[in-house]
Image (spheres, helix red, strand yellow):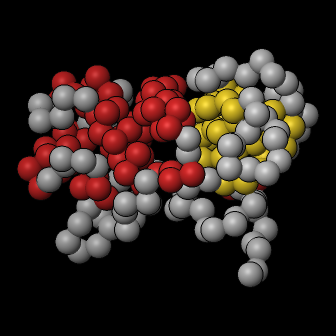
Amino acid sequence: MEEREHTREDLEEHAIVLDYLPIGRSSSARSEPLVQMIGETKFTLLEAVPRVAEIKVGESVYIGKGDRDKISLIKGRLNYQDLTEGARKELTNAVYAIVRKNEKRFVDLFNNASSLNIRMHSLELLPNVGKKHLAAILEARDEKPFESFKDIASRVSLLQDPAKLIVERIIVELKGESRFYLLTRPPAMPHASNY
């Protein structure tokens, strides 16, 4: 299997802790503490060995190439199915926090999204966005670019909570239930150690 070299843009710098397993997985022969996390840029699901025991679910930790204060080793990427029950329960909250923290980035998605092909626009990948919603979004953004989620909701009456649509789409992509990956990296290949 050929490994591709990762560029700086491919790697996550920060992640939100989804679950902390002080003695690791019960199915593992080796007992070591583990942390399951989600990257804050590309929503990469990761498993790591913590450097310290004071790691809390929901906290943001540095996982970049420099000196890490709380994470010792990134073991590799995970797929949704590899997450613990606790990590799955925390996932929506973590994704929502990331989306809210990076509101401009996701508002720009509404402002700049384009067609995927002749029949489908990329905004139609968002849950419950059909042709009527799409027409309303495109008409509103042609008048003036959106400035916030609140602005989108007020100008496109059919969309009550644009952040929720983004979060739902990210979860669909993380579960590997999509042909298109608009907001996340495609699921990890089996035994992928590089993140």
The quadrant of the picture occupied by the C terminus is bottom right
11, 20: nearer the viewer:
20
Q: Is residue 109 visible?
A: no
Name the residue rendered at 59%, 32% in the picture. 18
* Horizontal arrangement in the rendering, residue 87 relative to residue 176 (left or right): right
Name the residue rendered at 91%, 34% in the picture. 67
In the picture shown, does residue 118 fall above or below 12?
below
Q: Position of residue 26 (x, y in %)?
A: 68, 43
Name the residue rendered at 52%, 62% in the picture. 186
The quadrant of the picture occupied by the N terminus is bottom right
* Horizontal arrangement in the rendering, residue 38 relative to residue 131 (left or right): right
* Horizontal arrangement in the rendering, residue 152 relative to residue 83 (left or right): left
Q: Is residue 161 visible?
A: yes
In the picture shown, does residue 1 fall above or below 54?
below
* Horizontal arrangement in the rendering, residue 89 relative to residue 1 (left or right): left
178, 56: nearer the viewer:
56
- Outermost residue toward the right? 67
103, 75: nearer the viewer:
75
- Total numbered labels: 0
Name the residue rendered at 44%, 60% in the picture. 176
Q: Position of residue 5 (x, y in %)?
A: 79, 68
- Outermost residue toward the bottom? 1
> Where is residue 137, by image quadrant?
top left
- Outermost residue toward the left? 132
In the picture shown, does residue 19 fall above or below 113?
above
Q: Position of residue 33 (x, y in %)?
A: 78, 35
Q: Position of residue 165 (x, y in %)?
A: 30, 39
